[in-house]
Image (tube, grey):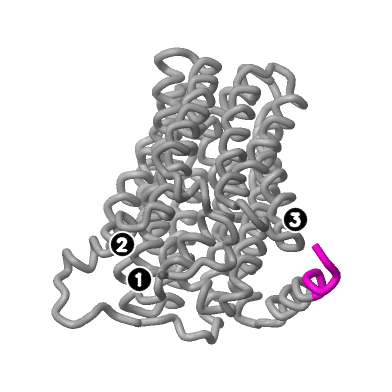
Amino acid sequence: MNASSGSELETNQIALLNRRDFRLYLFAIFFASLGSAAQSVAVSWQIYDITRSAIALGYVGLAQFFPMVALALPGGDLADRYNRRTILALGYAVQAACACMFLALAIIHYREPLPFYFVLAMFGTARALVQPAAQSFLPRLVDQDQFPQAVALSSSARQIATIAGPALGGFIYILGASAAYAMCLFLFAMIAIAVAFIRTPGGQTGPPPRVSSFQRLTAGILYIRTRPVILGAISLDLFAVLLGGATALLPIYARDILHVGPAGLGLLRSAPAVGAAAIGLMLVHIPLGRRAGIKMFICVAIFGVATIAFGLSTIFIASLGALVILGAADMVSVYVRQTLVQLATPDAMRGRVSAVNFVFIGTSNELGEFESGLTAAWFGTVPAVVIGGVGTLAVVGIWMFLFPSLRRVDNLALMTPD
């Protein structure tokens, strides 16, 4: 990178951070991720403490999966028809209400898992509304030439929060589940207020006249089907996350394999985000450059190898190292996919395309948790993780053959809807 390009990157970074609304967006992304990660540790540890069952941990993901799948496409349609800022504020308010319900269950020391699954389903409903609006709102906050760096910054903020969130949740859980949930309640309420102060218009681009509800809901799917680069990037991440969902089994590793307790669980949960944040911050200063597609495939393969290494490890430090590498590799895939999806989609379609992206990727986290819990119940914890890593490597090979246009993607900054 020459001196002029380095100076231009530094100027873009300063310009981005000088944007008041972008700073508020980063604030919301950071604390939403912090609260979600801390809450996830608290819920998973409490569920496993109540049930001592791997399949019960799988149901934690499944409880969120169904409402997210059912409501993501309507959520994307809402994001293209109404104010995205308002949708975000309401969605985070619902998440605050969910944290309040978890707090109430902890205070009364409820010892059955069913109410926890009900609240998780509500939380999944809120996420189905928040995610399409959040992803499609970001391009409105920055100029197009700043967008790849905005993705890197927002992803880094999310990952840094994901580092702190599980560790914070694990350590606070030592004081009791109610302390962890009270912190999450405060965070989600604060986020809803911050989003309400964003001044950038939230959209309401609206569909063309005389378009049916069914056509609006399925427009994002049809758009992606006709663009192999977007379809390949989204589906590659889907299967990698689905098969490599080892995080659902971390409570078992923390308690029964590595013997590190809830504080250790928090560190294990944070480890992938350490690697992801490091790569995200690097991408802010050093763009991915040429041959972005092939670099994405290489990093997803590294993700699979790191998953296998984690599954076989019985040493805490080695397990942390494998998870750090896993997160670093995943960050490159996230960066390429988010940039492709937003820059290759017109603004009037971004909510619905982001909704499909969320169905593919966001819900695959929850379905991956269920898959991991189910295979762990069938084959054992370690074989389940190793099988997932091997499956990820197989998907990389197949997708390189099925989507040659994705393999040939070069400079992300030059992507357009055409």
Q: Quadrant of the C terminus?
A: bottom left
First in sequence: mark 2 vs mark 3: 2
Magenta residues, as a range? 1-7
**Residue plotted at (45% across, 45% down):** 404
**Which class describes the residues within 10 Å of circle 1: few (<14), some (14-19), or many (20+)?**
many
First in sequence: mark 2 vs mark 1: 2
**Residue 273 coordinates in the image, percent (x, y):** 66, 45
First in sequence: mark 1 vs mark 3: 3
**Residue 27 coordinates in the image, percent (x, y):** 64, 69
**Residue plotted at (40% across, 61% down):** 354
Q: Is residue 140 above or below residue 382?
A: below
- The residue where tag 3 is placed is 282
Which corner quadrant of the image does residue 98 belong to?
A: bottom left
**Residue 56 coordinates in the image, percent (x, y):** 41, 28
At label 3, which amino acid type do we have? Met
Confirm whether residue 111 shows in the render: no
Give residue 223's mark: 2
Q: Secondary structure at mark 3?
A: helix
In reply to whether residue 53 is colored magenta, the answer given is no
At label 1, which amino acid type do we have? Met
**Residue 320 coordinates in the image, percent (x, y):** 72, 31
Indicate left or right for 87 with 141 as reference: left
**Which class describes the residues within 10 Å of circle 2: few (<14), some (14-19), or many (20+)?**
some
- Of residue 54 and residue 392, the one placed in the foreground of this image is 392
Q: CA distance from mark 1 to mark 3?
A: 30 Å
Closer mark to the observer between disc 2 and disc 1: 2
Q: Is residue 33 above or below residue 352?
A: above
- Confirm or deny contact between disc 2 and disc 1 (CB under 8 A): yes
- The residue where tag 1 is placed is 349
